[in-house]
Image (spheres, helix red, strand yellow):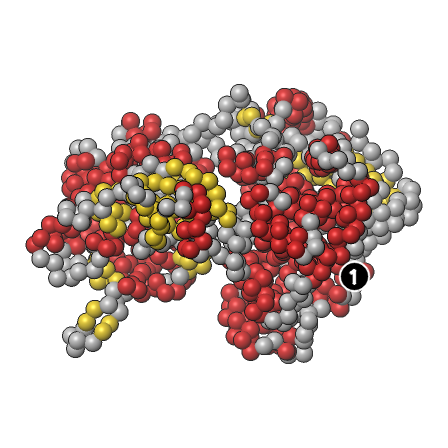
Amino acid sequence: MPETEHVEVRQSKISGAGRGLFARRDFSPGDLILSLDRPLVAEVEIERMLDTCAWCLQRSELDPEGRKLAASMGLPVGFIEVKVCTGCRRVVYCSKTCQSRAWKREHKHECKVIAPKERPDLPDGVRAVIKLLGRLKADPKDERILAISKFRPAGEASGLEALSQQNREKFDEFQMLALAAYKYTGEPKIAGSDSQALTKSLLSNIMSNAFELGSPLDGAEGGKLGIGFDPFLCNANHSCEPNATLVFNQPQTLLRALKPIKKGEEVLMRYVEETNPFSVRQADLREHYYFSCQCPKCKKGSKCQEDVFAKRPEELPAEYCKIADNLITRHEANLHNFFVPANDETAQLRMAALQAEAFSVSRRYTRYADEEEVKAALKMCINSGMWTWTREPVPQLCRQLFGLYIASGNPYRAFRLGLKRHFEITPKLHSQPFYPTRLIDLWAMSTVTNVLCGPMHQTIYDEFVQSGVSLRTVYFGFLLDLRDNLPKMYGMESPFGRVVEQTYAQLMANIGTSEAKIRELVKEVWPALEIIARKQRMSWPSLIDAFLDDERDATYAQCGETARTIFGRNFAVKPVKNQGQLSYTFVGTTAVLKFILSFRLEAGRIDPDVLKLAKEIHGGLVPDVEFCGHARTPAGKTLFVYKMPLLPGKDFWSIAGPDFHLDEGAVAKRNAMIKSLARYFARAYLKPQTVHAAVRKEQEEDALRRAAIMRKFLPEISAILDELEDNVPVLFGPFYRFVLTHADLSGASVLLNETTCEITGVVDWSGASVRPFAVDLPSLFLAGGAGGWWLTGKDDDNKEKDDAWREYPRRGELEEAFWAEFFVAACVTDSARERRTRRWHAEVAGKLATIIRFGFDRRADGSVSDRPLQENKDLLRAWFGNDKVVKEEEEKESSGVEYITETDEDEESSGVEDAPTAG
């Protein structure tokens, strides 16, 4: 049952704040101020609609590998099952109880509205208002819902007008979303109300006052689950020195005291991160809540501890002055949000630019963050000498990096960073041991420590024992600390509390030691653990780099030794010539066998389902792969060990390298290779794959976003980017084929017969995925010329030169041979004009993929980052310079290319994938 009797709503004394929540009795730190069974509004965000219960917001991990990892770490997402609503197939529930409660209260009002397949997934705010309108239509006098209209901005006479002047973009967005909710609901008539005006009021007020909903047990994921709003709870005003904090217990929602609160005192919570500098807090409040804070801390301006740098801005080292100067333009539009008091205007601008860069990285959700970018931002802050480890955004960057280490399966590195956070960072930011962030961190550290106690990390465990620290005792220490403080925040009956209590009970049942004795052992070991943590203090760049970078990487010798451990001492290994970024690959030899052994990092794992599909399509060109177990790098990274037969042939680069003086025999071989490649593409084309419309849309938006980045980076190829942007809707539309595509169809991945140049094998399927047909066509570009970092030729004066790209004299002949062979192998019997159109769109897909592959840098896990790759500028100009593209455009127009849809059979094959059934 809700508990709200200990607080009351009345006029706040804060200037311009309106109503507020006031204590009706004294509260001590950790006391429960109010409790709601569930907020009036609790909506999962779009990305969580199919993995998070729409009633209680408990998430399920749908990815099998992620689920297995979560289960091994004791996380609920590894065990929770969700089933889709059979009516709309848009939302899921974790139990019949949740589904029944949701239907009775709200889902019956939205189910049919969101069900149509052609309708896009609606934003959380729109879905919330659709439900509320349905409830009001049934009960026009529902006071809780009508109370929403009293909030800002719509609750004030000129509130919406003021919003339109302050943030026109946000105002227009609210108007559009409100109109969508109104129209999708069928323009409902609500007795006693102007329905359309009420819809605008509900939408604007919810989106302007919503709080974030997340799970303490999903910290490694780092992203929110949805938004919440309640007309009683949302009366609580903001302060940058809050005396209370919000707790979401999925779905129960609590307000807990952080400090002593006297009877009659206003209860204040934070809307934004209170540890941020003054200008950042104010900017966040203006952007999201449309007011400026006048709390006691903010009245002091930039004179509080949160704004203090380690040195004066004027003392920024010269190296970082240059970095800052380059960042000023990038962040010019937002520099005012990162104001830094300084006597020198130039120094002020530079520090604002550095802050803007660091905060831009720290504010990405962990699932969207890049480990290398986070480390680079951390190094910039600390190595510049301006930031301490407790000045934001350094603490948030550390938290972000900690989550990335966990998500990528690096428990040792997470543990090292977690120790620093536990002893030196978080306690200085939040003094209360029961503060939510500290409890979440305790759970994460206990989980990571438990992993390090396992047999896969015996060496690390032994290293700590030699330092006088038993990691098993440390594990108990974190868990007991968490269990002691949970009752003052989440409570032991919360999902978080139940998991902790269950873990504790299982541990105590399996050991023969009393809790009192364990606490004595923890007390003995803790000083030694703190010494280890504080040894990681760093004051110069080399130590910081060593701390953040993986200096304990695996070597070929170590992998070879591991191979002999797995397969026997008579096992001989030799590294292959061309190694991948995410693997160590060897030719393994015994007395009678020869095969490939591959040690692969987490991001380079081979998906058995993808491999199975590849074999169905390409048969014997795809090797059988046997998973042989795990190995570990000295830094604690898990390596996945695979064995596969040694396929015949040599790699693409060895046979098809640059040679501009081809004799007739060489031309014949190259043609044979091109035709073999065409048959490879045809096999994939004949096996179209089903892809959900939302996935197509997501890939389309990513392509357009990258095109926009590249347009700014390299305007010299704007003509090709215009062409790509015009065709992207076709490539990701419902009629264009999606097929299994290889991530790197060149280099060491394609094996050729030395004599015939026919393809004998295609290996390394770790990055393969279902994407638009021909996005792996960069292989054809590479086969039609040579250049870049590995082409060295002679100019007319016989001097060495390094060209960006040179096409083979007979490239046109090679391309014609490719497409002629493809159309035959793919059984395409269209007219010549239709073939030209199909070829045109496939080549556009290939150009798009080529620009993404060669135009952007790679992250540490091998995925494509958003950072343009400076060293490939010349290569892209040579391929896609505006003059060349204009010429090709004229040729296209003269050939009469137009869009041709697929056959009816193809249309069926590209339909939207069904949502999960309801079991």
Residue drawn at x 40%, y 34% as measured from the top left: 609
Residue 301 picture quarter: bottom right
Residue 338 pos. (x, y %): 63, 65
Amino acid of disc 1: Lys
Residue 2, image x, y percentages: 80, 31
Quadrant of residue 547 within the rendered picture: bottom right
Looking at the image, which is closer to me, 744 or 181? 744
Total marks in image: 1
Q: Secondary structure at mark 1?
A: helix
Q: With respect to residue 466, does 327 lie above or below?
A: below
Give the residue drawn at x 55%, y 73%: 320
Question: In the rendered view, would you say 434 is above or below 392?
Answer: above
Regarding residue 841, the answer to whether it shows in the image is no
Q: Name which residue lies at 19% across and 32% down.
A: 827
Name the residue: 88% across, 44% down.
Answer: 27
What residue is shown with label 1? 297
Label 1 Cα crowd, 10 Å radius (few <14 / some 14-19 / many 20+): some
Q: Position of residue 461 (x, y in %)?
A: 62, 49
Reply above or below: 797 against 237.
below
* Percent x, y of residue 137: 66, 25
